[in-house]
Structure formats: structure tokens, C-alpha cells
Image: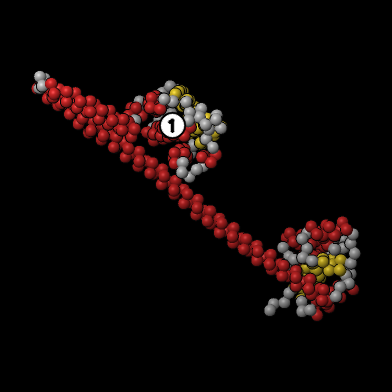
């Protein structure tokens, strides 16, 4: 087993001789001797001992406490203080340096041996703890990096799914509007033609009237479904007009007053930006209708300095913090994902019986 190397820092010759004999008798190696604080630091750097025996009171500008502090700071070596007498303030200074023990001069070899072995054990334990902590920190960093990558992949997947969903909505809306709408319109025309052939057949005319009502209802249903899937105004009239239309429809269906203001009056964005903002507005109103218990909603859309802001304020019961971060609040999760996709900012706040504010800010360029 490799012998323990010890640096002895002491400025009294007789004490040095006593310590040296005691250490060698216990099987330790006296790797170096120093008589001053400055010399102790130099020797510690040169021989790299396993432990330092440091006299607290040394002659010269640097006392043992300051020397021990530097050795611990520079080389992280265990230090045991040697002291024959010291006042309370000196001992308090020594404690701050985190010593591995004290030996009072004169000492017995047994006490010296116990102190050194305890200090070495403590030093090894601390070193092992440092290694374990370093390994744990490295593992945490690796896991954090992995989780970050997974999180980004999930966000990318969410954005991809939103894009695909909107494309499918647009396709289905167009097919429903064009195919079913045209078919029902043709059916209504044919039904009117057939009715002209049986003008005098009263039962048939009554049936014809009933059938026309059903066809008209089906046409309205087709238009509503098509519009819900993809508002036509969004593609043809722009974002402001589409939101204004949806606000009016929301008021008509729910009897909740919805006021909308756009500045400038007509805001037209690219397709991806437009559908993102529209869906955020749509989802916010859906939440108001389902959960807020509101009677009035005020919304404002503003484009200024390359930034688009959308504010939606209701006078309902006010959203709670638990509801904001509920894992089942898929509407809010969807809003967050859409805002995140555009590197925007989202602020949701609620006041008990004072309503809820949804504040969205997106870095967009006006078209």
C-alpha cells in the first residue's frame, strides 16, 4: 500500500524533530518541511502531499491560518492544525478555513495517528462525494439535454399536426362546399322543375314545399360545416374580416355580446399566420362560451411595429391558476403551441369574478 506523504509546517526546531520522529514511527512519510506560510505554499505545490500538518502561529508575514486557507483554495489538500496556545479569535479564524482537525502540542503519538487517519478518511470521503456529485451533475445535464430534444421534437410534431389538420380542414371544407353544395342546389332546381309539372296536384305541392325546406336546411348545414372547417373570408377577405365575422356568429349563437376592433381596419397576413391567429381567437371564444359564464367579450387586433397583438377580455368568473396549467385544458394547450410556433408571447390572467384576459403577441410582418 502506498505510504501517506505529509508536509510539516512548523517554525520550532525541537517540535519539528518530535513530529518527524512520531510520523516515521507511525509509518508515514515526511515529504517536506516548511517554516513559513509562504514556504508551505511553495512546498505544497512542489511535492503535492496527501496531508499538511500546519502550525497556527508562524513567524513571518503569513501565519498558518492564511497559509492553510491558500493551500485549501489552490490544491484542495486536507490540513490539520498544530497549536500550543491561541486566543479565541484566532481559533475562530482557523475554523473558517475548514480544517480536518486540531492537534494540541505537546501530543501523544496515538492522538496524532487518530487525527491523521480521520483526516485522510474524511478527505477520501469528500473526494468521493465530489466525484459522485460531478457524475450526477453530468447525468442531469445529459438527461436535461435529452428531455429538451424530446420536448422540441414534440413541439415540432404538434406544429406539423396543426399544419396537416389545417390542410385537411381546407380540403374537406372545399369538397363539402363544392360537391355537396352543388348537388343540393341542383336537387333544389330539379325539385322545382318537377313541381312545375304537377302544379295542380295539391298533395304533391305540399310535399314539395316540405322537401324544399329540407333541402334549404341541408344547404345551410353544408355551409355552416364548411365555414366551421375553414372560414371562406379568411382566404378571400383577410384576417380582420374573418375575425369580425366569427365574433358576430359567436354573439348570434351564444347571446354573449362580442365587440371587435381592428387597427388598422384591414389586416391581411400570409395564410399560416392568418389561420394561427384566427384559431387562437376561435379557441378563446370557445373557452368563454364553455367555462367563463360571461355576458360580454371585447377583442382587439392590432398590427404595429412589425408585431401583431390580439387581446381578448371577458367579464366572466375569471380563470384560476390551476385551470391555466391543467393538463386536460386542451384548448389552452393548443393556443400555447400555436403561439410558440411563431416565437410569440402569451399571457393569460384571471381575476375572481372579474373576467379573464388572453393577451397574444406575435412577431409578424404586415402584408
Residue 93 picture location, percent across and down: 83, 57
**Callout 1 crowding tier (Cα within 10 Å): few <14, some 14–19, many ≥20:** some
177 and 128: which is toward the camera: 177
User: Which residue occupies 55% across, 30% down?
Assistant: 353
Residue 7 lies, in percent from the top left, at: 78, 70
Asked whether 210 or 239 is in front, the reply is: 210
Residue 313, visible in the rendered structure = no
Q: Percent from the top left, x then y, of residue 237?
A: 35, 25
Question: What color scheme is it?
Answer: secondary structure
Vertical position of residue 289 compared to residue 48: above or below? above
Quarter location, residue 6: bottom right
Outermost top residue: 200
In-image side of 74 versus 142 (left or right): right
The residue shown at (77%, 71%) is 116
Identified at 59% across, 60% down, the residue is: 136
Above or below for 117 versus 278: below
Q: Nearer the viewer, residue 286 or 100?
A: 286
Is any part of residue 180 visible from this angle? yes
Q: Residue furthest front?
A: 203
- Which element is circle 1 on? helix
Q: Mark 1 = which residue?
A: 289
Q: Is residue 280 left or right of residue 222?
A: right
Q: Quadrant of the N terminus?
A: bottom right
- 233 left or right, relative to 188: right
Q: Is residue 42 left or right of residue 367?
A: right
Amino acid at each position: 500500500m502506498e505510504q501517506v506523504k505529509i508536509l510539516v509546517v512548523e517554525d520550532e526546531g525541537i517540535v519539528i524533530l518530535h513530529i518527524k520522529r512520531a510520523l516515521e514511527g507511525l509509518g508515514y512519510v515526511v515529504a517536506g518541511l516548511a517554516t513559513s506560510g509562504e514556504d508551505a505554499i511553495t512546498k505544497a505545490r512542489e511535492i503535492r502531499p496527501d496531508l499538511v500538518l500546519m502550525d497556527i502561529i508562524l513567524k513571518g508575514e503569513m501565519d498558518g491560518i492564511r497559509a492553510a486557507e491558500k493551500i485549501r483554495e489552490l490544491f484542495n489538500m486536507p490540513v490539520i492544525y498544530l497549536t500550543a496556545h491561541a486566543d479565541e479569535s484566532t481559533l475562530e479564524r482557523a475554523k473558517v478555513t475548514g480544517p480536518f482537525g486540531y492537534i494540541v502540542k505537546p501530543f501523544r503519538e496515538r492522538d496524532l495517528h487518530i487525527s491523521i487517519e480521520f483526516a485522510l478518511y474524511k478527505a477520501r470521503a469528500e473526494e468521493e462525494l465530489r466525484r459522485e456529485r460531478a457524475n450526477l451533475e453530468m447525468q442531469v445535464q445529459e438527461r436535461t439535454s435529452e428531455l429538451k430534444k424530446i420536448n422540441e421534437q414534440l413541439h415540432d410534431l404538434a406544429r406539423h399536426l396543426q399544419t396537416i389538420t389545417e390542410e385537411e380542414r381546407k380540403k374537406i371544407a372545399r369538397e363539402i362546399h363544392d360537391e355537396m353544395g352543388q348537388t343540393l342546389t341542383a336537387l333544389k332546381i330539379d325539385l322545382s322543375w318537377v313541381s312545375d309539372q304537377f302544379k295542380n296536384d295539391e298533395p304533391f305541392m305540399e310535399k314539395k314545399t316540405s322537401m324544399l325546406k329540407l333541402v334549404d336546411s341541408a344547404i345551410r348545414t353544408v355551409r355552416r360545416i364548411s365555414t366551421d372547417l375553414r372560414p371562406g373570408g379568411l382566404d378571400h377577405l383577410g384576417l380582420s374580416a374573418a375575425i369580425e365575422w366569427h365574433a358576430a356568429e359567436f354573439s348570434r349563437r351564444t347571446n354573449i355580446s362580442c365587440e371587435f376592433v381592428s387597427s388598422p381596419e384591414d389586416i391581411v397576413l400570409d395564410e399560416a399566420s392568418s389561420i394561427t391567429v384566427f384559431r387562437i381567437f376561435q379557441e378563446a371564444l370557445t373557452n368563454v362560451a364553455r367555462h367563463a359564464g360571461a355576458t360580454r367579450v371585447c377583442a382587439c387586433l392590432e398590427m404595429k411595429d412589425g408585431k401583431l397583438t390580439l387581446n381578448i377580455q371577458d367579464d366572466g368568473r375569471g380563470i384560476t391558476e390551476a385551470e391555466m396549467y391543467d393538463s386536460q385544458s386542451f384548448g389552452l394547450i393548443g393556443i400555447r403551441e400555436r403561439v410558440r410556433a411563431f416565437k410569440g408571447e402569451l399571457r393569460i390572467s384571471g381575476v375572481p369574478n372579474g373576467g379573464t384576459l388572453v393577451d397574444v403577441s406575435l412577431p409578424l410582418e404586415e402584408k
